[in-house]
Image (cartoon, rainbow, N blue to C red):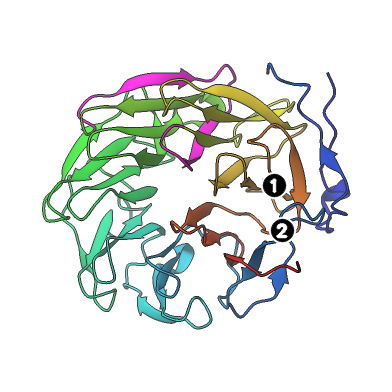
């Protein structure tokens, strides 16, 4: 079985030609910025990514969240900042920068006024969670159980149910509020998970969490858990066969069809890399190959069951596009070090990586 390499030679950040396919179907077992062509082969002429008018990260931006086409927020992790836009990403203003410089990893809003931000370094500086009720003009720290040492992801289920998990270096905790963020409970996900990185809930009771079996990356296996009682108890749904892997991000374009990226930070020895796909709402997962060498996938985002992107932590790896549900992947000129994708219901998309990006539908000839 052969995988066609899509790596950039010599670690040079050259742009791909767009003509080379990642032919992996045979491995069944296993906006003010410039427009960016996300699809050099012309498969999706109506979709266009552009770079938003936001400064480049020292390495990568971790999260961005929009409540509609115009209003959104972004975290600047290493500076401990939150910025807001009200014109779709054309201009931004800083709203929050506490003196203790938390490493802000995640952000999510219920509506135009109520939102939450998560800090990766709560055991060292700052608080695990912050809350605003005035659109981000002011933020207050949430007094959480000290067992929560950091937050990697936040999900707004509805105005009452707010869920979060963390962190990727351990310990693994699930955090939940059922009163809009006024009070919180904590569930320890160990020893099944040594680290927790992302989550997706379909309603207040049913959800999925990904992470790794160990907080030490070289000793970790990719793990997926699910719950049907609001996170009080969890069932293991997948455990990877290879050391050096951890689940990183989830994307569910429908209730049943979902995808999970696998970060291979601790992988030794190389070989093909994989992502996971479910077609039954997270109860079972299939491991699918997509790249023939070290990739270290992070962000993954699908706007439909078939069309999606995956990004790498490495600066010498391209972002990839699939139009057939992950059976084949193609290099794309969009995105460097993409860590998080988010989409509105109409398919408008946003991504956080080296830059902040926006996906819009554009008119096409004919």
Alpha-carbon distance for marks 1 and 2?
8 Å
What residue do we see at 77% from left, 44% from top? Answer: 330
Give the image quarter of residue 255.
top left
**Residue 37 vertical position relative to residue 144 in the rendered view, above or below:** below
Query: Residue 361's x, y, as percent?
Result: 60, 65
Badge 1 local density, few (<14 within 10 Å), some, or many (20+)? many
> In which quadrant will I find the C terminus?
bottom right
In this image, 170 relative to 264: left or right? Answer: left
Q: Which residue is mark 2?
A: 38
SS at mark 2?
loop
Q: Quadrant of residue 170?
A: top left
26 lies above or below 65: above
Q: Residue at x 82, y 53 (%)?
A: 41
Q: Determine whether label 1 and label 2 are within 8 Å by CB.
A: yes
Q: Which residue is tagged 1? A: 321
Name the secondary structure under disc 1.
Answer: strand
Magenta run includes residue 207: no
Nearest the viewer among 290 and 264 is 290
Q: Is residue 14 above or below residue 282?
A: below
Segment tinted magenta in the rendering:
231-256
Q: Residue at x 24, y 76 (%)?
A: 138
């Amino acid at each position: 079985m052969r995988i066609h390499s899509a790596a950039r030679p010599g670690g040079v950040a050259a742009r791909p030609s767009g003509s080379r396919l990642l032919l992996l179907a045979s491995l069944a077992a296993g906006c003010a910025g410039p427009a960016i062509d996300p699809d050099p082969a012309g498969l999706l002429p109506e979709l266009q990514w552009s770079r938003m008018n936001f400064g480049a990260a020292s390495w990568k931006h971790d999260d961005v969240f929009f409540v509609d086409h115009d209003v959104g927020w972004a975290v600047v992790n290493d500076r401990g900042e939150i910025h807001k836009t009200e014109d779709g990403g054309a201009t931004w203003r800083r709203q929050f920068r506490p003196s203790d410089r938390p490493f802000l990893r995640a952000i999510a809003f219920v509506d135009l006024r109520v939102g939450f931000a998560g800090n990766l370094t709560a055991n060292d500086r700052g608080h695990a969670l912050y809350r605003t009720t005035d659109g981000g003009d002011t933020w207050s720290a949430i007094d959480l159980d000290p067992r929560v040492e950091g937050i990697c992801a936040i999900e707004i289920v509805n105005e009452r149910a707010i869920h979060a998990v963390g962190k990727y270096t351990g310990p693994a905790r699930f955090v939940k509020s059922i009163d809009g963020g006024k009070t919180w409970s904590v569930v320890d996900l160990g020893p099944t998970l040594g680290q927790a990185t992302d989550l997706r809930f379909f309603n207040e009771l049913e959800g999925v969490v990904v992470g790794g079996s160990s907080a030490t990356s070289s000793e970790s296996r990719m793990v997926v858990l699910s719950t049907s009682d609001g996170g009080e108890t969890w069932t293991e749904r997948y455990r990877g066969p290879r050391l050096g892997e951890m689940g990183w991000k989830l994307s569910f374009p429908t209730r049943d069809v979902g995808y999970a990226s696998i970060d291979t930070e601790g992988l030794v020895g190389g070989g093909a890399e994989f992502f996971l796909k479910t077609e039954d709402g997270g109860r079972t997962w299939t491991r699918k190959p997509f790249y023939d060498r070290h990739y270290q996938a992070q962000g993954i985002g699908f706007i439909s069951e078939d069309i999606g992107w995956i990004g790498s932590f490495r600066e010498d790896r391209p972002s990839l596009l699939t139009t057939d549900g992950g059976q084949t992947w193609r290099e794309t000129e969009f995105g460097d070090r993409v860590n998080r994708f988010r989409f509105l219901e109409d398919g408008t998309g946003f991504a956080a990586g080296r830059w902040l990006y926006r996906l819009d539908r554009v008119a096409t000839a004919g």
